[in-house]
Amino acid sequence: MAALAIEERVEQVEDKVDRLEVLFGHFMTQTGTTIARLDRTIARLDQTVVEMKAEGAADRQRIDAALANAAADRQRMDENLAAMKAEATADRQRMDENLAAMKAEAAADRQRMDENLTAMKAEAAADRQRMDENLTAMKAEGVADRQRIDAALANAAADRQRMDENLAAMKAEAAADRRRMDKKWGELSHRLGTLAEDLVAPNIPRIATEYFGWSQVDDLMVRRFVRHKQDRSKRREFDVIAVGEGQVIVNETKLTPKVDGIDDFRETLDEFVGYLPEYEGFKIIPIFAALYLRDDLVAYLTRQGIYAMAMADDTMELLNFDALT
């Protein structure tokens, strides 16, 4: 039994020895690896030291060169400073000379000013004497002028009386002229009220032929009063209507053309067939007429698609025909 116990102890000791050998082997392996890493690190450090020494030597050379350049720059600065001092001395000398010349010139100017002032005082005294003499003469002339003015005022009073008499006669004549003009304006207003019949309507057939190529006018209506066929409460007067060639010329004539009159005509054209359904399907040619049309009204009519008709040299013509064709 004792021998068996000793053998077991021996086996345990051998097992421990084996484990220690294994651990020692691991230790040696790790130690070798660590030593190899240390060797590499030391080698890199040595290389770094060598490089730093070389870089330090290069820096020392650059510093020495910079010191040499600084010494040369200091020498050039000293030379420039000496030159600047010499130039400053020369400038100061020139300034002193210029100042002396300016003082001499100022003294000469002061002397000339004193002489001029003396001459001006003498001339002013002479001018004052002449002014006193002129004032005396003017006073005498003023007395004569006052006498002439009094005579002129007397004449003006007589002239005013004659003017009042003439004005009264002119007022009476103007009143008579006004009565005659009122009568003539009444006659002219009556004639202008028939502008569509007297001037526009006779030109429509020629306009239809020359501008729109009609061979003839089948029907010409002046001041056509007609009631709307759907809305019997509406009644409209068309200044001139001309029919021919499957077309209808619809004319609006104004003595004093305005934009609102053009707008009213535009609305009437939209309802034309409602007033005269027998012309449904006919091409409608709208013409807005006046004795004279301003350029802005002609442009407005063109934008509305309406022909502008007014007096030219000796007859009525379409002013915007080319713009609408």
Image (cartoon, grey):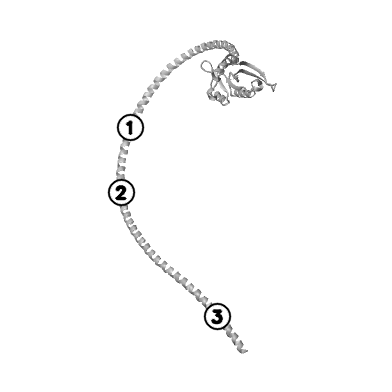
Which residue is rendered at x = 48% and y = 74% of the image? 32
Question: What amino acid type should be assigned to the residue bearing mark 1?
Answer: Asn
Residue 261, above or below 79: above
Q: Residues within 10 Å of mark 2 (few under 14, many from 20)?
A: few
Asked if residue 6 lies left or right of residue 44, the reply is: right
Circle 1 sits on which residue? 116
- Front residue of 324/56: it is 324
Question: What amino acid type should be assigned to the residue bearing mark 3?
Answer: Asp
At mark 1, the secondary structure is helix
Query: How far from the left and from the top, in percent, is residue 312?
Result: 52, 18
Q: Residues within 10 Å of mark 1 (few under 14, many from 20)?
A: few
Query: How far from the left and from the top, in percent, is residue 36?
Result: 46, 72
| First in sequence: mark 2 vs mark 1 | 2
Spatial separation of the CA atoms under disc 3 and disc 2: 101 Å
| First in sequence: mark 3 vs mark 1 | 3
Circle 3 sits on which residue? 18
Which residue is rendered at x = 41% and y = 18% of the image? 141
Please say if the residues under marks 3 and 2 sit with CB atoms less than 8 Å apart. Answer: no
Circle 2 sits on which residue? 87
